[in-house]
Amino acid sequence: MEGKSSLEPLEEETKMNAEPERKFGVVVVGVGRAGSVRMRDLRNPHASSAFLNLIGFVSRRELKCIDEVQQISLEDALSSQEVEVAYICSESTSHEDYIRQFLNAGKHILVEYPMTLSRAAAQDLWDLAEQKGKVLHEEHVELLMEEFAFLKKEVMGKELLKGTLLFTAGPLEEERFGFPAFSGISRLTWLVSLFGELSVVSATLEERKEDQYMKMTVCLETENKRPLTWIEEKGPGLKRNRHVIFHFKSGSLENMPNVGVNKNIFLKDQNIFVQKLLGQVSEKELIAEKKRILHCLWLAEEIQKYCC
């Protein structure tokens, strides 16, 4: 979405200073990195957390208890009337099934990106959420990062000539997190949020599975036919980093300065989710967000087709 959106977390004192009339019971599904951060935020005294009550967590592992939070079975989480919200923080390949189960059980959903591994499945789940009258929120903490705020400010009002976004990181299991265009969809989200809807010109995937190495190179085009290249490179020893080169008519941006630490980005995302639960996000904003998410999933599918 172009420009400033009130989907950015509002100042806590403006929207969440009132004592909540009720608390939504929450279960966290999956307790890896994201799930653990979600549980921490739910248990700490934040403005949005005051509207939420952490009831338990679901995990395939036998953990019984984490920091006094009880493990509960998936069946109990689905059937409990006390559970009104599910945070889906499991591997990407399991998201669609969990969302469908919890929506059918009448629960609101917060899910880590990508919500599904196809555009059609995402549309189907949003239709189901609408039918059930429930919130289905896909997390996009990359839009809450200091780096993105910097880039948004830098590109505002400038005419793009061409650009490149390179992301490097350690290996990631495709079997758990999906094809690289889906596991790396936050990079697509950056590019679409900065430059509008895109189309895929070409895409290649270089893989050396024995070395746990992959490099995906995607050539994209803006609606004004300006070229953008997205490179996703993962392998042992590669540090997690983003490199950008954007050339504009008025000059170039050739590195990402150190713009500070990303503080509480999952909490900021939770604030947005609570605003949706409370009906404080406009229909216009919800439609624009959904359009962007579906467009990025479509791009990821197109990239996968080119590579395969």
Image: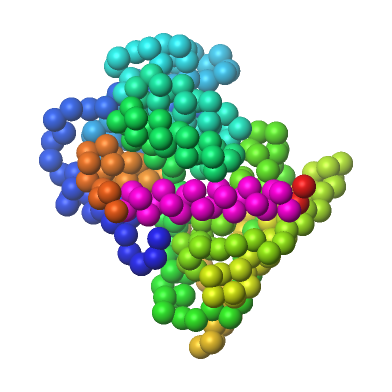
* Percent position of residue 51, x then y: 24, 33
* Percent position of residue 11, x then y: 23, 54
Is residue 302 one of those drawn in magenta? yes
Quarter of the rendering containing residue 188:
bottom right
Quarter of the rendering containing residue 19:
top left
Q: Is residue 168 above or below residue 106?
A: below
* Percent position of residue 93, x then y: 61, 32
Residue 279 located left or right of residue 273: left
* Percent position of residue 31, x then y: 51, 28
**Which residue is situated farthest in the bottom direction here?**
250
- Please give the name of the residue rendered at 44% of the width and 42% of the height, measured from the top-left corner: 138
- Please give the name of the residue rendered at 33% of the width and 27% of the height, measured from the top-left corner: 132
Q: Quadrant of the N terminus?
A: bottom left
Task: Looking at the picture, tell me which residue is in the foreground, 64 or 51.
Answer: 51
- Please give the name of the residue rendered at 63% of the width and 65% of the height, measured from the top-left corner: 220
- In magenta, the rendered stretch is 285-306
Q: Is residue 19 above or below residue 239?
A: above
- Magenta stretch, main secondary structure, is helix
